[in-house]
Amino acid sequence: MHDPAASPELIHLPEAQARRLVLAQALEAGDPEGKLVGRLEREQIERDALAATGDPARGEPLDPKAYLLARTDRLLDLLSHRQPALASLQQPPAWQAWIAWALPLVALVAGALIERIDNPRQVNLLSPPLLAFLFWNLAVYVLLVVLALRTPGPAKERAGWWPRWFARREGGLRGQVARRFHQAWWQVAGALEAQRWRRILHLSAAFWAIGVGLSIVLGGLVREYRIGWESTLLDLPQVHAFLSALFAPVVALTPLQPFSMDELARLHFTSGSGVGREEARRWVFLYLALLGLVVVLPRLLLAAVAWWRERWGARALAIDLGDASFAPVLGRVRPARVSLLLVDAADARTTVIEQALRQAGGVPPPADPREAWTVLSTARGDVLQCRAQAAPAGGNGPAAASKPAFWSRWLAPDAPAKGPRAPVDLVLLAADLPLTDAALAACREPALPVVWLLGQGNEAEASAMLRRAGLAGEVLPAHALPTWREDRRLHAALARQLPPYKAPGMERLGQAWRQRAQGRLAESMCLLAAELLLAARETHQLAAEPVGVRQLVVRGEREAQHEARRDAAAAIAARLRERQAANDARLLSLHGLDGVLPATGWQPVLPQRFDVQQAVHEPQAGLAGAASGAAMGAAVDLMTGGLTLGAAAAIGALVGGGAGLVGAALKNRRTEPGLTSVALGDEMMKALVQSALVRYLAVVHERRAAPETQRWAAMAEAAVEEEATVLRQLWLETRAEPAGPAETRLAERLERLALQLLAQLHGAE
């Protein structure tokens, strides 16, 4: 865990809750495959915890602390039935309870069992065991002062060797979870555990001193101490000075007095003077007082301080939710904020980035260049943001002669930032090879992973340049994003370079990205389907006499009819162009493009095959039919040599006249009297479908890839020809029932054709 003091996501929990939470996280990290608690069970636990504490998907704010505790309770309750040994880690180990009093008791007994100080027949005033014990405690006090004055390091350094020791222990799956728990617990509660051990050790040292004092007293009860001193290196004045300094605390705080120089001279073992019991008693009282003042009281005070710190620390242990161990758990439920730094290296391919990001969320860059661009957001609260930074000119490569329109329009690099900038997750670099030193410096400064959108140059060479520059990341060729359909390559590359804890949020953003693309495709196809169905129902009515003998004979009548039909066709074509222009503007707006669709050098060829419906003069049609039938009957008479006696001609006239009358009547039923209807034929409708698909391909490739309209047209023509029968049936249905479901069916058919063409152009997804 990183230093909690520097983290904005600290929570404070009592020791019991903290142990449970750390154990739950150890189970999450140590059992990723869900062998102890299955993945489906964990997902249900998380859903229940979200429902109990607040679900961002329902617009409720997420309380990470409450959510983690609710999840922990449910997870450990389930674990306690399956793995009681693991679940028992949520409680402090039993040995901590008895070692807190057993170790001081052992120290007391060990000190009391000392039967001699140095020599059973005589006691040295310079007793090495006693002096070593006293000086050891003084050294401990000095060390504690030094540690207190030292600036504390990061939590990982303060954790000491305990986590590393636990990390080296081996075991199965349960052992791995337990090992992770112990390691994480010492990182979270290392200070608390240190205070606990300090309390025990200080108390043990005090009890050891009490035991030593008891040993001295008990020894004085059963034998008479012979007090004296001897030394090879120290003379009498030096011994006197040393003992005066040693017993200075006792003299300052008690009525006891140390030995004078004359007394010390008499107490030398070689002086030959007798030493009375009074000197022995004074030595006992001096050493007991010294042990009490130097060891017992300070150690008891330090133990009390450690106990107070232990109790205070156990009330609120700091846990950093920004640690990597919490990232997968919180990342699945909390909103993720992904921030990109777009570095412009004077590459015209930045239009590809512009199109991809604009189409991701349908949000244009902000008008204020100092604001961050919120590209995309989700219902759960995930946000994809970016800000731009132009790489300064200079270096060993080509410098920027002029800024691309996207960057100069969106973000001025010299504009002061408005407010504090959000932390950046990765750099999105747009550049060609060779890359300038200035551009490399712009990528190195934030020390973040790089996704390089390479305009021109070799991908392997660009990857090698990143490695040589010491930059982590990957290279994505600009030609790999020819349309929205390939944008998933971009957000997949972004997801691979993000911190793991943001992966779930980026997945939700990517899903929203794809859903918006699918919705835009469906809306585009609905626009084109509505346009085509209007064209299929498009008719132009002309005032004209029913077709009769006169129109067939009189040249002026025929030419007038042809001219009227040409005018009708021109009017229909004008309305088609008007609707196409309106739909082109809507398609461009849907895809984040401004202006009009650029000229592609290809225009659809509409075969002039209109469907003309004109009324027929029924009596003249009957007479014409009768005449035709009579002629055919007469031919039969001639062939039979007149055997039918003219009956064949009469029957032919009757049948032909009747057929002519019936045919004219049926034809006139579809045409209003006195009007001629001009509509688009099936061949013209096929050409319009082809044109609609080519226009869509031009829109989705705009600012991303070079147009290939001739190739697109050939592919669209072949695809439409395969669907000719289905399309013809749709035209008939929509003409017969304009309010029917033909539009939905046609939109689905067009969507399938568009995806088929994109797959043929750029490969399967």
Image (cartoon, rainbow, N blue to C red):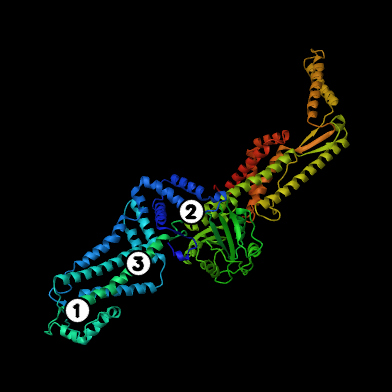
Q: How far apart in space, not on screen, are marks 3 and 1 (Cα)? A: 32 Å
In terms of secondary structure, where does tag 2 sit? Answer: helix
Q: Is residue 616 above or below residue 471?
A: above
Between label 3 and label 2, give the one nearer the viewer.
Answer: 3
Query: Mark 2 near mark 1, Cβ–Cβ under 8 Å?
Result: no
Q: Mark 1 points at which residue?
A: 125
Please tell me whether residue 180 is drawn above or below residue 554 in the rendered image: below
Residue 158 shows up from this direction = yes
Is residue 643 left or right of 355 when viewed as pictured? right
Q: Name the residue under label 2.
A: 66
Residue drawn at (71%, 43%), measured in percent from left and top?
Answer: 531
Measured from the top left, where is residue 128 in percent x and y?
20, 76
Quarter of image, res 169: bottom left
Q: Where is residue 479 in the image (x, y as percent from the top left)?
A: 57, 56
Callout 3 amino acid? Ala
Mark 1: which secondary structure? loop
Q: Looking at the image, is mark 3 or mark 1 earlier in the sequence?
A: 1
Residue toward you, 523 or 643: 523
Residues under numbered marks 3 and 1 in contact, where contact means CB atoms less than 8 Å apart: no
Decide: is 399 above or below 707.
below
Disc nearer the start of the sequence (2/1): 2
In three-dimensional space, the C-alpha distance between marks 3 and 2, rounded to whole angstroms, equals: 34 Å
Residue at the disc numbered 3:
304
Instruction: Sort mark 1 into few (<14), some (14-19) or many (20+) by Cα contacts within 10 Å.
Output: many
Q: What amino acid is at disc 1?
A: Leu
Q: How crowded is mark 2: few (under 14 residues within 10 Å), some or many (20 or more)?
A: some
x 37%, y 45%: residue: 81
Tag 2: amino acid: Ala
